[in-house]
């Protein structure tokens, strides 16, 4: 099992989020194909298709550490999802009227 070390940040070190853009698709595809990401996120093309569909209720972000992309996150505005879609989710009742997130680190 790969070990991850925690790191302490100084004031000069920055983690930031920025809206994902088309130029990020190659790095997203590369990340989605990594074994530890694929294990949890499944087939990369399914995610790429979802991102390319540009749903107005899903918002995608790139996580950067000192201006270097290190991960991806998204949030769903459950109130804006198409009628009937959210009800298919196993935790639908828990999230109705809220927002939810998903993320991974490359």
Image (cartoon, rainbow, N blue to C red):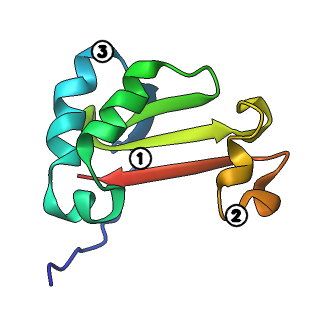
Query: Which is nearer the eye, 85 or 96?
Result: 85
Q: Nearer the viewer, mark 2 or mark 3?
A: 2
Decide: is 36 above or below 2.
above
Q: Residue at x 26, y 58 (%)?
A: 37
Q: Is residue 64 visible?
A: no
Q: Residue at x 82, y 50 (%)?
A: 96
State the mark number for residue 22.
3
Q: Residue 42: x, y in percent?
A: 30, 56
Q: Residue 31: x, y in percent?
A: 20, 45
Q: Nearer the viewer, mark 1 or mark 3?
A: 3
SS class, disc 2: loop
Q: Nearer the viewer, mark 1 or mark 2?
A: 2
SS class, disc 3: helix
Decide: is 68 above or below 87.
above
Query: Which is nearer the eye, 32 or 72?
Result: 32
Q: Find disc 2 in the rendering and name its residue.
A: 91
Q: Quadrant of residue 15?
A: top left
Q: Residue at x 33, y 40 (%)?
A: 46
Q: Classify 10 Å Cα crowding around label 2: few (below 14), some (14-19), many (20 and above).
A: few
Q: Find disc 1 in the rendering and name its residue.
A: 11
Q: Residue 102: x, y in percent?
A: 50, 51
Q: Residue at x 35, y 42 (%)?
A: 12
Q: Classify 10 Å Cα crowding around label 3: few (below 14), some (14-19), many (20 and above).
A: few
- CA gap between label 2 and label 3 equals 31 Å
């Amino acid at each position: 099992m790969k070990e991850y070390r925690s790191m302490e940040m100084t004031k000069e070190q920055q983690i930031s989020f920025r809206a994902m853009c088309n130029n990020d698709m190659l790095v997203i595809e590369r990340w989605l194909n990594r074994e530890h990401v694929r294990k949890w996120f499944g087939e990369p093309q399914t995610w790429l298709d979802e991102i390319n569909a540009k749903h107005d209720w899903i918002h995608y972000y790139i996580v950067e550490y000192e201006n270097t992309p290190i991960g991806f996150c998204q949030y769903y505005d459950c109130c804006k999802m198409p009628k009937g879609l959210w009800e298919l989710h196993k935790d639908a009742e828990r999230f109705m009227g809220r927002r939810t997130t998903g993320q991974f680190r490359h």
